[in-house]
C-alpha cells in the first residue's frame, strides 16, 4: 500500500469523524427544528458535506486494493476513537474509566489490523 493511499484513508477517517461531530453540533446550536431550519443549518450542511467527501476518499482507497476486511474496521474503529475524544473536548461529555479502557483496546485493535497493510 503506497503512502498516498494511506494518507487518503486517514483523510476519509477524519472526514467521517468530523461529519459526526458537526451533526452533533447542529443538534446543539440550532433553535429551529423545522424542515427549513434543518436543511439550512450550516452545521448540518457541513456534516453532510463531510460525509460525502469521506465517502469519496474511502471509495478511492478501496479502488487501490486495500481489502474491505482491513479498510472498514480501520475506518470505523478509528472514527469511534476520534468521536469519543472529540465529544469530551468539544461537547464536555463525561468519559468514565471503562470508556478510556475501550479507547485503549480500539487503539490496540487498530494497530493489529493496520500491521497487515
Image (spheres, rainbow, N blue to C red):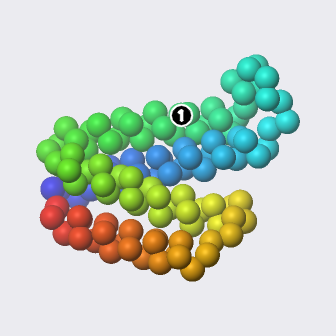
Above or below residue 41? Residue 85 is below
Above or below residue 71? Residue 109 is below
Q: Which quarter of the image is occupied by the C terminus?
A: bottom left
- Could one spot residue 3 in this view of the protein? yes
Most extreme residue toward the front is 98
Image spot of residue 28 (x, y percent): 76, 46
Q: Residue at x 65, y 67 (%)?
A: 88
Left or right: 29 in relation to 21: right
In-front residue for pair 71/109? 109
Most extreme residue toward the top is 36
Above or below residue 89? Residue 73 is above
Most extreme residue toward the right is 31
Q: Which quarter of the image is occupied by the N terminus?
A: bottom left
In-front residue for pair 25/7? 25
Q: Residue at x 31, y 66 (%)?
A: 110
Image spot of residue 98 (x, y percent): 53, 76
Residue topped by disc 1? 49
Counting the numbered discs, the total is: 1
Q: Residue at x 55, y 44 (%)?
A: 19
Left or right: 20 in relation to 79: right
Image-quadrant location for residue 83: bottom right
- Could one spot residue 89 in this view of the protein? no
- Classed neighbour count for the residue bearing mark 1: other residues with Cα under 10 Å, few (<14), some (14–19), many (≥20): some
Image spot of residue 85 (x, y percent): 57, 66
Image spot of residue 47 (x, y percent): 58, 39
Left or right: 79 in relation to 29: left
- Element class at badge 1: helix
Amino acid at each position: 500500500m503506497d503512502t498516498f493511499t494511506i494518507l487518503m484513508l486517514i483523510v476519509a477517517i477524519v472526514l467521517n469523524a468530523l461529519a459526526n461531530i458537526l451533526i452533533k453540533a447542529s443538534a446543539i446550536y440550532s433553535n429551529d427544528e423545522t424542515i427549513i431550519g434543518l436543511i439550512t443549518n450550516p452545521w448540518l450542511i457541513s456534516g453532510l458535506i463531510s460525509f460525502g467527501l469521506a465517502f469519496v476518499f474511502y471509495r478511492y482507497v478501496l479502488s487501490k486494493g486495500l481489502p474491505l476486511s482491513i479498510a472498514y474496521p480501520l475506518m470505523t474503529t478509528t472514527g469511534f476513537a476520534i468521536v469519543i475524544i472529540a465529544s469530551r473536548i468539544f461537547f464536555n461529555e463525561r468519559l468514565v474509566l471503562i470508556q478510556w479502557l475501550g479507547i485503549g483496546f480500539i487503539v490496540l485493535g487498530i494497530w493489529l489490523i493496520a500491521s497487515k497493510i
